[in-house]
Image (spheres, rainbow, N blue to C red):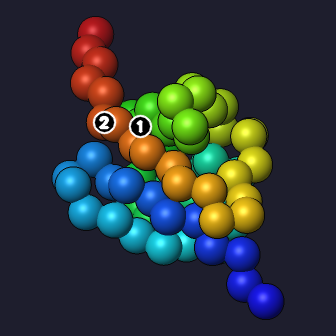
Amino acid sequence: MWVMVLVHLPDGTTATVSAGTVEEILAGLGLNPYEILATCGGELLLGDDFVSDDQVLATTSIVHGG
């Protein structure tokens, strides 16, 4: 049985991916985890937080500069 996570991407589209850490999920979608904020249920997640069990992950692109 596959555990899937629904991801709302910064461009407004959605993707369904296998469960994993935030960093694994973002990298699997070709997103740089240092340029994306991820939340689940309104809670900010860190890269090593595990997302599973049909959870919904929301992502927001951040801009940074030097």
Residue 36, numbered circle: 1
The N terminus, quarter of image: bottom right
In the displayed structure, 42 sits above or below 33; it is above
Q: Gap between marks 2 and 1, in whole Å?
A: 5 Å
Do tag 2 and tag 1 residues touch (Cβ < 8 Å)?
A: yes
**Could you tell me which secondary element the residue under label 2 belongs to?**
strand
Q: How many marks are shown on the rendered structure?
A: 2
Percent x, y for residue 49?
74, 40
At x 50%, y 64%, the residue is 6
The circle drawn on residue 61 is: 2
Q: Residue at x 74, y 40 (%)?
A: 48
The quarter of the displayed image where residue 3 is located? bottom right
Quarter of the image for the C terminus: give it: top left
| Horizontal relation, residue 19 to residue 60: left or right | right
> Can you tell which quarter of the image residue 64 is in?
top left
Residue 5, above or below 8 = below
Describe residue 36's horizontal placement relative to residue 53 as left or right.
left
The type of residue carrying mark 2 is: Ser
Neighbourhood count class around disc 2 (C-alpha, 10 Å): few under 14, some 14–19, many 20 upward: some
Give percent across and percent down for residue 22.
62, 48
Q: Secondary structure at mark 1?
A: strand
| Residue 15 visible in the shown view | yes
Question: Which one is earlier in the sequence, the residue at label 2 or at label 1?
Answer: 1
